[in-house]
Amino acid sequence: MLYLLFPPVTTILTPKDVGFGGYHRYGKFNSDSDNDDLFWAIFRTGPGFADQSSGDNLIRSIAGVISHEMTEAFTDRDDNGYLTNNGCEISDLCETAGNFTYQGFGVERYWSNWDHACIQGDNPVRLRRFLKAVAHSETPPAGVRWTGMPRIGIEDIATKKRSQ
């Protein structure tokens, strides 16, 4: 579970950096736990950074930062995930690649080792390419049902599940 925190516009986040828009961190919800189990991302919402004219406009104005931090939190939630040799996470590598529009929101691209490029997250990997990358044949392994779709995305799965 990842908590997204949108503090009041008067909140000043640190570090105080001109390009700073948000960050993600982790910790322990239960201090007796052996594992980190609390994950969050927090975003700047103050004047000059976010459109405060409405809640919808606020989220739309920082959607690129939100998508950046969520992508990194999902792939490097506790500093033991994907990092390049120089410490960059998958969204850091694509900050200058520009956003793309997904369902009306400006979403940031992220790095794909398979494509050796910054990609849009709305174009999922083809199933055959995925199976080849994880060394499976195109024949479904025992116990696996094909969905009958050439690509599998979360929206495809949700739609198929709802229709069953």
Image (spheres, grey):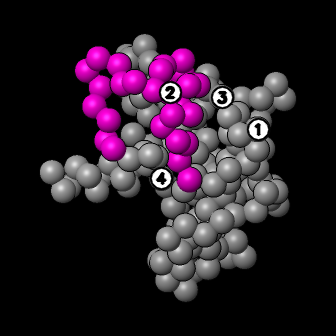
The CA distance from mark 4 to mark 1 is 29 Å
Classify mark 4: helix, strand or loop.
strand
Q: Is residue 5 visible?
A: yes
For the view shown, which residue lies furthest in the front direction?
139
**Image x and y of residue 136, in percent:** 48, 19
Classify mark 3: helix, strand or loop.
loop
The residue under the point 60% across, 32% down is 76
- Mark nearer the viewer, 2 or 4: 2
As displayed, is residue 106 above or below residue 91?
below
Mark earlier in primary sequence (2, 1): 1
The residue under the point 32% across, 35% down is 146
- Mark nearer the viewer, 3 or 4: 3
Residue assigned mark 4: 4
Q: Are marks 2 and 3 in contact (CB under 8 Å)?
A: no
- Mark nearer the viewer, 3 or 1: 1
The prevailing secondary structure element of the residues shown in magenta is loop
Residue 142 covered by magenta stretch = yes
Residue 75 covered by magenta stretch = no
The CA distance from mark 3 to mark 1 is 15 Å
Q: Amino acid at mark 4?
A: Leu
Residue assigned mark 1: 116
Q: Which mark is residue 82?
A: 3
Residue assigned mark 2: 131
Q: Which mark is residue 78?
A: none
**Image x and y of residue 154, in percent:** 39, 49
| Figure label count | 4
Q: Amino acid at mark 1?
A: His
The CA distance from mark 2 to mark 4 is 33 Å
> What is the magenta range?
123-148
> In the rendered view, does 130 fall on the left or right side of 155?
right
The CA distance from mark 2 to mark 3 is 21 Å
